[in-house]
Image (spheres, rainbow, N blue to C red):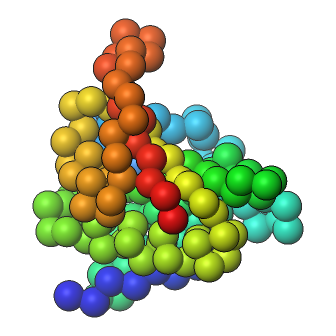
Amino acid sequence: MKIVLKDRTEENVRLYFEKSQQNEIKQMLPQKAKTVEEAVEDFYKTILPNSTSYGKTIYVEDVYVGDVWCYCIDKTETPNAMLSFCIFNKTYWQKGIASIAVSLFLKNIHEKYKFETIGAFTFSNNIASQRVLEKNDFSLIEEFDEDGRLSRYYERLL
């Protein structure tokens, strides 16, 4: 199975927004943009030179299946960011695709930004995302309650 990361386009953003409205995804992945227009506007901010977020699309055998990105990019003396990912195409769930995509993306952002650490949040009941993080050498740092929902914070040295 060939998994490739590609640059994001407005077309990808529109499709991702539509697909990420599925209940199963919305329950596991908080979303900042409430409309497709907001999502497109946010995308154009990510391609500016000093953007604090950066992402790639995930393709499997030339089929667009999801996104992986980092946000809260901090390029100060201890460069770091936060990681997020989503496979929106359910046909590709439970196949190890997110684990491989995250691994590829971590190499990409380490070369691009020279991050020392990267963190990731996930809800405690999102076992699939926790497995992806653990397969990519993230360590559980803490579990906490956020607005009545149990969440976890993971971190990895790069």
> Which residue is outermost to the right?
49
Q: Quadrant of residue 38?
A: top right
| Residue 49 seen anywhere in this rendered image of the structure | yes
Given residues 3 and 135, the one toward you in this image is 135
- In the rendering, at what x and y percent does residue 151 appear? 36, 26
Residue 121 as seen in the image, left or right of residue 36: left
> Which residue is outermost to the top?
148
Q: Is residue 16 above or below residue 145?
A: below
Residue in the picture at 45% in, 47% down: 155
Residue in the picture at 38% in, 72% down: 103
- The quarter of the picture where the N terminus appears is bottom left
Residue in the picture at 61% in, 52% down: 81
Q: Quadrant of residue 150?
A: top left
- In the rendering, at what x and y percent does residue 31 appear? 51, 38
Figure label count: 0
Q: Is residue 101 above or below residue 67?
A: below
- In the rendering, at what x and y percent does residue 119 appear? 50, 47
- In the rendering, at what x and y percent does residue 21 appear? 40, 43
Given residues 70 and 143, the one toward you in this image is 143
Residue 79 as seen in the image, left or right of residue 143: right
Residue 9 as seen in the image, left or right of residue 91: right
Residue in the picture at 35% in, 88% down: 62
Given residues 31 and 50, the one toward you in this image is 50
> Which residue is outermost to the left?
94
Q: Is residue 90 above or below residue 7?
A: above
| Residue 88 seen anywhere in this rendered image of the structure | no
